[in-house]
Image: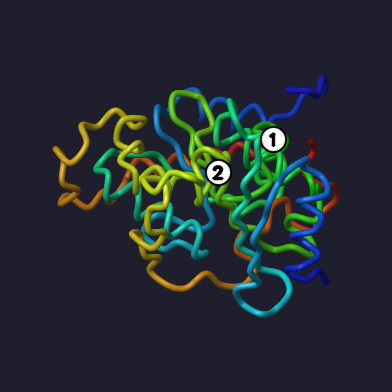
Amino acid sequence: MPTAEEIKQRIEAAIPGARAEVEDYTGGGDHFRARVIAAAFTGRSRIEQHRLVYEVFGAEIGGPIHALSLRTETPAESASPTTASPREAVHPTYAASEEDAEPAASAQQTPSR
Amino acid sequence: MSSTESNPIRDAIAEAISEHEIILFMKGTPEAPACGFSARTVAALQASGAPFAAVDVLPDARIRQELSALSNWPTIPQLFVKGELVGGCDIVTEMYETGELSQVLGVSAEATPAEEPLESPQPAGQGLSIENRLG
């Protein structure tokens, strides 16, 4: 079961120059929230930025890591106050719960990448 | 798309994505989301006021597998607009907060208060039609 610190280190090791802040927001070792700042994000769409981070973990997303909520920023964005918008504007009707972002089930194969 | 063998579930998913300008693959339904991330994404979409189709991935684990294989995106929910993956909960929520979501969805920002709750009769049907094609 990974810790927030391990997740942080793996992101920072895999994406050159990345800085990550990772929080285990349930304390259960499987739901994480990460803010990642990396020059590698520059010029990439948000989808591509998130994919870069997801790719660090491959099939672990949905396995040991049930949820990895991401906020990605380029160094320029992280320096700009306008992008630091509040995160909680849309409230879920209930709190995120077990197995939230679990993908391709435990069935036969991992989501192909 | 990387697979050459016939794959009816993936075909059905691809067809649903191409047939619906705005389509959300989620856990549960817009009326009864089965996960907090799906609930949050539905809330952002509903607040933006754009009608959307929704597919519940829970009835068959293969839907999720094939969707992730098709989209190269590991988690649920996934929002597609005009055939393109826009993102999951984090991205959609962020875009809602910045006002980008309305633009992407093609609804004028703020102009369409989402006072009509989208009870989404046709969205639910779309989910079923995918399910029905599983044979």
On the rendered structure, is B40 left or right of B108?
A: right
Question: How busy is the neighbourhood of tag 1: few (under 14 within 10 Å), some, or many (20 plus)?
Answer: some
Q: Which residue is mark 1?
A: B72
Q: Chain of mark 2?
A: A
Q: Nearer the viewer, mark 1 or mark 2?
A: 2
Residue A82 percent location from the top left of the image: 36, 45
**What type is the residue that disc 2 sits on?**
Glu
**What type is the residue that disc 1 sits on?**
Asn
On the rendered structure, is A24 left or right of B103?
A: right
The tally of labels here is 2
Instruction: Classify B51 as above or below A42.
Output: below
Q: Residue furthest bottom?
A: A27
Residue B131, numbered label: none
Q: Residue at x 73, y 36 (%)?
A: B69
Residue A23 percent location from the top left of the image: 63, 69
| Residue B91 visible here | yes
Instruction: Classify B43 as above or below B80.
Output: below
Q: Which residue is mark 2?
A: A73
The C terminus of chain B lies in quadrant: top right
Residue B76 percent location from the top left of the image: 59, 50
Q: Chain of mark 1?
A: B
